[in-house]
Image: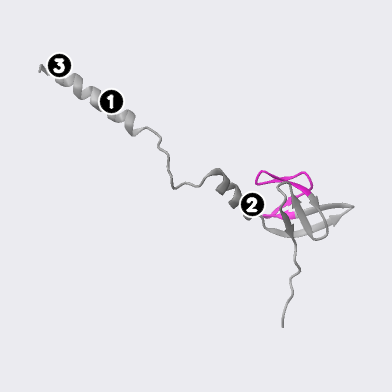
């Protein structure tokens, strides 16, 4: 083989190796979209419900929300004295904290 052919083959192999290294591979250990959605749904932390001037609001994940607001791509559909209903059918309940002496 001539020197030019060997150099050409080496350059071709080098360029091919670079393209293989930059390929994005699927990671089977990553959760699917449904698992991510489940995690997001389980991450709702209802801390308070307020009723001011005839309008309800709630504190979810340290953010004030109203009916129609979105949290983790889920819409708040109803707020009552002690519950918040989400568009996915989940209901968040507010419980009173009781101190025991």
Q: Which mark is residue 4?
A: 3
On the picture, is 17 further left or further right than 61?
Answer: left
Residue 96 within the magenta-colored segment of the rendering: no
Tell me which segment is drawn in magenta.
59-77
Q: Quadrant of the C terminus?
A: bottom right
Residue that carries the numbered disc 1 in the rendered image? 15
Mark 1 to mark 3 CA distance (whole Å): 16 Å
Q: Which residue bears the numbered disc 2?
A: 41
> Which picture quadrant has residue 42?
bottom right
Q: Position of residue 9 (x, y in %)?
A: 19, 21
Q: Is 12 on the left-hand or right-hand side of 97?
A: left
Residue 21 image offset from top left, x and y in percent: 33, 34
Q: Residues within 10 Å of mark 2 (few under 14, many from 20)?
A: some
Residue 1 located left or right of residue 18: left
- Please tell me whether mark 3 sits on a helix, a strand or a loop: helix
Spatial CA span between label 3 and label 2? 62 Å
């Amino acid at each position: 083989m001539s020197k030019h052919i060997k150099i050409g083959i080496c350059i071709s192999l080098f360029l091919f190796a670079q393209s293989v290294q930059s390929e994005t591979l699927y990671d089977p250990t990553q959760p699917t979209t449904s698992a991510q959605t489940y995690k997001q749904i389980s991450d709702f932390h209802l801390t308070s419900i307020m009723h001011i001037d005839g309008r309800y609001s709630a504190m979810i994940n340290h953010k004030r929300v109203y009916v129609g607001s979105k949290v983790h791509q889920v819409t708040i559909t109803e707020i009552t004295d002690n519950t918040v209903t989400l568009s996915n059918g989940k209901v968040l309940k507010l419980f009173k904290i009781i101190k025991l002496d």
